[in-house]
């Protein structure tokens, strides 16, 4: 009798706990990110942790559905009137979170703002083919490009619409601290370095958010993120290393969510400063990295090798350009030839990147005669240095690049085109090819240009492609969500399940 009572009591307690959890969870979703948002102004940085937050505050001009197709959002339709002019028909039933109406003025202002060099947007190179946006009527905006631009719509899926009157009233600095959009969630509080709290916008035009409150927490240490998931302190965690994902698969109450993406894991190599200014050192670094070994040992099925800086979902990607095979002897020979034995290599990194991967590459570089030193920074500082002067941008760094546009124009153009804030490299022939590929609507010509551009990158080695990245998340079994290849963390796509 006592045993039956104990069993019944335990079952009742379990049910009560489950019910209490479900009730609490339906109100608040807690997400652990590797870093705090670097910005909440959607026209500045385009790093994953920033846009994971601000994408929920703003609507975009157009967007992608879960299958990856470009679909309407603030623009309900569009048409080309010539090869360089496109008109967008703007919805007339959308309001910002302060109740003011979103109009064509806000759309044109948002486009003109992000292409203004004075804003110094890290996204500028992805929009700089646009000359101007003009208001034709309260619901019609005309966009003119410098030349035919085949990647225009693919780039515009990232353009968030900001309220012109509010931004001009408060100024850029306050807008970054207190952003206001027309999206499904509004900012409650941003505790920099700690967390960002959002609350559902009850008047959102598109859907009624199933989750009322969202807390994005900055948790750089992956073991802490995993502990938070195990204890229920976090409902969703980003950037889960492959080995940890595999071990968590068998744990009760936890699910592993993953999807192959257009994102490419790559290594940036500074071609304009330090020991890596010598192409022989850059080539040696490429030969020194055992990419297949890294993928097998550290990614464990959550990545696929690539020979160039691109991935199969990307237009312009090619498998016809040969990659660098692992050859440490060749690497040593090149380093000796360059007189670079013992040369200092500054390896910049942040919590956004797998520390085990960073340390494995460090060891490979040291094994061929370089003196590689890891410099770990918070994400905002890491981005500032990577986008700054070559002399302060480190010798090498890992990256996981996605333009969310599925076009090589959004990858190798911003990373390597002369003048880009990301590029620590310049080659006029490469520039000519990528400029040509982004200014013609002829797909076959674009593919030829991109293959030639990739061949130049192979010879000059300002960076090397390592793997097609998979997004890997750890989540509560109570969370219903299917991640997509474009890595959009839209909370409106999430809900609670029993």
Image (spheres, rainbow, N blue to C red):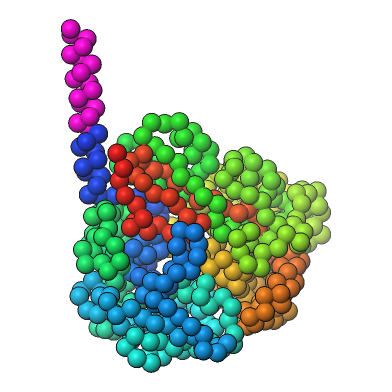
User: Is residue 7 magenta-colored?
Assistant: yes
User: At 25% from the left edge and 74% from the top edge, which residue is drawn?
Assistant: 96
Q: Is residue 423 above or below residue 356?
A: below
User: At 31% from the left edge and 49% from the top edge, which residue is drawn?
Assistant: 495
Q: Is residue 275 visible?
A: no
* Front residue of this view, candidates 137 and 417: 137
Seen in the image, is 242 located left or right of residue 293? left
Q: Position of residue 148 (x, y in %)?
A: 59, 85
Indicate the quadrant containing the C terminus: top left, top right, bottom left or bottom right: top left
Mark count: 0
User: Is residue 172 magenta-colored?
Assistant: no
Boundaries of the magenta span: 1-17
Q: Is residue 230 visible?
A: yes
Q: Residue furthest top?
A: 1
Q: Position of residue 58 (x, y in %)?
A: 33, 69
* Front residue of this view, candidates 192 and 498: 498
Q: Position of residue 379 (x, y in %)?
A: 44, 59
Tell me which corner region of the image, top left, top right, bottom left or bottom right, holds residue 105.
bottom left
Seen in the image, is 206 located left or right of residue 361? left
Q: Is residue 85 above or below residue 65?
A: below
By secondary structure, the bulk of the magenta-drawn segment is best described as helix
User: At 42% from the left edge and 39% from the top edge, which residue is drawn?
Assistant: 255
Tell me which corner region of the image, top left, top right, bottom left or bottom right, holds residue 120.
bottom left
User: At 63% from the left edge and 45% from the top edge, which residue is drawn?
Assistant: 295
Indicate the quadrant containing the N terminus: top left, top right, bottom left or bottom right: top left
């Amino acid at each position: 009798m006592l045993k039956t009572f104990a069993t019944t009591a335990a079952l009742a307690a379990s049910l009560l706990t489950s019910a209490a959890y479900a009730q609490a969870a339906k109100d608040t979703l807690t997400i652990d990110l590797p870093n705090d948002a670097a910005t909440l102004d959607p026209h500045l940085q385009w790093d994953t942790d920033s846009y994971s937050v601000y994408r929920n505050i703003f609507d975009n001009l157009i967007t992608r559905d879960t299958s990856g197709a470009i679909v309407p959002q603030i623009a309900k339709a569009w048409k080309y009137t010539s090869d360089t002019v496109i008109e967008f028909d703007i919805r007339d039933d959308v309001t910002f979170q302060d109740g003011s109406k979103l109009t064509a003025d806000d759309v044109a202002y948002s486009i003109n703002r992000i292409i203004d060099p004075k804003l110094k947007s890290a996204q500028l190179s992805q929009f700089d083919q646009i000359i101007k946006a003009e208001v034709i009527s309260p619901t019609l905006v005309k966009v003119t490009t410098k030349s035919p631009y085949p990647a225009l719509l693919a780039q515009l899926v990232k353009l968030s619409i900001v309220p012109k009157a509010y931004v001009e009233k408060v100024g850029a600095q306050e807008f970054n601290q207190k952003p206001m959009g027309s999206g499904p969630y509004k900012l409650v509080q941003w505790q920099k370095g700690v967390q960002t709290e959002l609350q559902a916008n009850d008047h959102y035009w598109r859907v009624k958010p199933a989750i009322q409150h969202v807390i994005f927490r900055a948790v750089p240490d992956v073991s802490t993120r995993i502990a938070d998931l195990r204890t229920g302190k976090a409902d969703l965690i980003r950037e889960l290393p492959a080995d940890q994902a595999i071990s968590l698969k068998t744990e009760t109450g936890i699910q592993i969510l993953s999807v192959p993406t257009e994102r490419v894991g790559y290594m940036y190599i500074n071609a304009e400063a330090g020991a890596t200014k010598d192409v022989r050192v850059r080539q040696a670094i490429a030969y020194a990295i055992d990419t297949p070994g890294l993928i097998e040992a550290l990614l464990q099925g959550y990545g696929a090798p690539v020979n160039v800086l691109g991935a199969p979902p990307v237009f312009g990607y090619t498998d016809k350009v040969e990659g660098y095979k692992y050859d440490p002897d060749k690497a040593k020979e090149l380093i000796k030839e360059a007189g670079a034995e013992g040369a200092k290599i500054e390896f910049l990194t942040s919590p956004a990147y797998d520390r085990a991967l960073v340390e494995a590459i460090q060891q490979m570089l040291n094994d061929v005669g370089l003196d590689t030193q890891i410099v770990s920074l918070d994400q905002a500082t890491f981005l500032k240095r990577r986008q700054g002067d070559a002399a302060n941008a480190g010798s090498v760094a890992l990256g996981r690049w996605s333009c969310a546009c599925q076009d090589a124009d959004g990858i190798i153009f911003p990373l390597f085109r002369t003048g880009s804030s990301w590029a620590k490299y310049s080659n006029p022939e490469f520039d000519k090819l990528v400029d040509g590929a982004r200014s013609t609507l002829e797909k076959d010509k674009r593919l030829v240009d991109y293959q030639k551009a990739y061949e130049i990158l192979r010879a000059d080695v300002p960076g090397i492609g390592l793997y097609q990245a998979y997004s890997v998340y750890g989540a509560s079994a109570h969370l219903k969500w299917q991640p997509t290849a474009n890595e959009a963390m839209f909370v409106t796509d999430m809900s609670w399940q029993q």
